[in-house]
Image (cartoon, grey):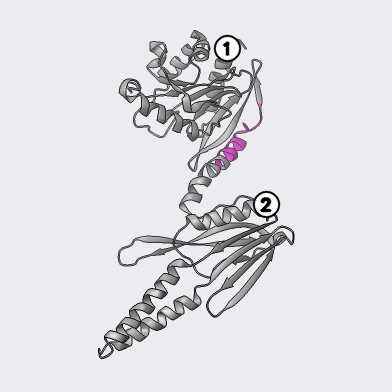
């Protein structure tokens, strides 16, 4: 039914553990009744019965018609329900609990799904935390999408990975606003802006201009350390790294159509090939873009800001450039200071104008 979403969450591990305890206790009573440790069998039977009785099966029902979320709990002996109106829910997320072993010092995480309420309250879907984050994250995500709730930070490994770029982008946006560089600008007739992005949880800088757009292909240039080889038998590895790099900088499929069929492009001038490697799905268009007025500024950039195998953490690190159907991008995996941002913008303007703009 389109107006209803039903999710069943069964505590299979608890039930299996309870059955195992009952089986162990029954075996000890039948075959080892004369043993002086018969009370261990009784304890196992009691523990098994408790696990089967107190591990509730949970049925979650989200009803759009009634705008009601119902949590229905059932065990062998008990039955209870909780109801939460959609309008009371702020979001649904996964909460984590970290425990530490005092002897070894190691830590482990357990999880549960919770509904955060608009009045500041919270409704845990279960009273306890348990291992296994993927299933819980899936439940929370399905409910958010069905009810129409905002995205939430799930305290799971998958949730942290998914949220990391957003955290970095928020930090980048805050720094751009502090620099007074968050508004679109124009230089020599070229419109451009600095876009906040995150690489992991770290802020990064991306420059963008819509003034030049490719005819449907894309050309991606990534700075490399001097002497780094990308051709020959390393070409498949380089192509894989190119695709990972595109995702790292937040370039979408609209920016890079046909990226799955793209290949490395090696027809670079010696001065440019010393510092950059290229990746394209349209070699003919890449050849037109890489005129001397494009290659020379990039080669000069590589001489001024060479990429080293081990960066010091100061100044520019890797520069990437994307000529795309949406516009021209330049990106660096760092939050630049005002002077560095102006230098990046000057290069971007020069690259756009190199295309006859």
Label 1 belongs to which residue? 355
* Front tag of 2 and 1: 2
Q: Could you tell me which residue is drawn at 44 percent across and 24 percent down?
A: 222
Magenta-drawn stretch, dominant element (helix, strand or loop): helix
- Which residue sits furthest left? 35
Within 10 Å of disc 2 (Cα), the crowding (few <14, some 14-19, many 20+) is few
The number of discs equals: 2
The correct choice, above or below, for 30 with respect to 117 in the image is below
The mark that comes first in sequence, 2 or 1, is 2
Q: Secondary structure at mark 1?
A: loop
Q: Quadrant of the C terminus?
A: top right
Q: Could you tell me which residue is drawn at 47 percent across and 25 percent down?
A: 261
Q: Could you tell me which residue is drawn at 61 percent across and 66 percent down?
A: 123
The correct choice, above or below, for 354 with respect to 315 in the image is above
Q: Nearer the viewer, residue 130 or 103?
A: 130
- Which residue sits furthest right? 65
* Residue 202 seen in the current view: yes
Q: Nearer the viewer, residue 119 or 111?
A: 111
Span shown in magenta:
171-184
The correct choice, above or below, for 115 with respect to 287 in the image is below
Q: CA distance from mark 2 to mark 1?
A: 44 Å
Label 2 belongs to which residue? 148
The correct choice, above or below, for 290 with respect to 129 in the image is above
* Residue 118 seen in the current view: no
Q: Where's residue 50, x and y in %?
A: 45, 79
* Circles 2 and 1: CB atoms closer than 8 Å: no
């Amino acid at each position: 039914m389109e107006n209803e979403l039903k999710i069943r969450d069964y505590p299979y591990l608890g039930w299996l553990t309870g059955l195992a305890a009952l089986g162990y206790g029954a075996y000890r009573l039948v075959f080892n009744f004369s043993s002086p440790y018969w009370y261990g069998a009784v304890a196992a039977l009691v523990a098994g019965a408790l696990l089967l009785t107190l591990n509730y099966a949970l049925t979650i029902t989200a009803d759009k018609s009634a705008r009601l979320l119902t949590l229905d709990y059932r065990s062998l002996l008990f039955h209870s329900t909780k109801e939460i109106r959609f309008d009371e829910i702020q979001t649904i997320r996964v909460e984590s609990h970290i425990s530490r072993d005092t002897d070894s010092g190691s830590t482990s995480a357990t999880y549960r799904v919770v509904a955060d309420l608009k009045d500041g309250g919270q409704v845990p879907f279960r009273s306890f935390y348990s291992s296994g984050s993927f299933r819980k994250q899936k439940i929370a995500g399905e409910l958010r999408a069905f009810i129409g709730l905002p995205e939430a930070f799930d305290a799971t490994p998958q949730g942290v990975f998914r949220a990391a770029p957003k955290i970095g982008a928020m930090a980048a946006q805050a720094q751009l606003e502090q620099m007074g560089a968050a508004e679109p600008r124009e230089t020599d007739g070229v419109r451009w802006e600095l876009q906040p992005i995150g690489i992991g949880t770290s802020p990064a800088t991306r420059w963008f201009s819509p003034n030049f757009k490719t005819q449907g292909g894309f050309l991606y240039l990534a700075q490399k350390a001097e002497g780094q080889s990308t051709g020959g038998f390393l070409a498949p590895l380089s192509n894989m790294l190119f695709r990972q790099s595109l995702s790292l900088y937040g370039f979408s499929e609209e920016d890079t159509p046909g990226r799955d069929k793209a290949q490395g492009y090696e027809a670079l001038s010696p001065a440019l090939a010393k510092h950059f490697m290229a990746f394209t799905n349209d070699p003919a268009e890449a050849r037109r873009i890489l005129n001397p007025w494009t290659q020379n500024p990039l080669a000069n950039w590589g001489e001024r800001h060479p990429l080293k195998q081990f960066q010091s953490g100061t100044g520019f690190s890797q520069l990437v450039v994307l000529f795309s159907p949406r516009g021209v991008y330049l990106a660096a995996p760092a939050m630049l200071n005002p002077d560095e941002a102006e230098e990046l913008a000057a290069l971007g303007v020069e690259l756009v104008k190199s295309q006859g703009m």
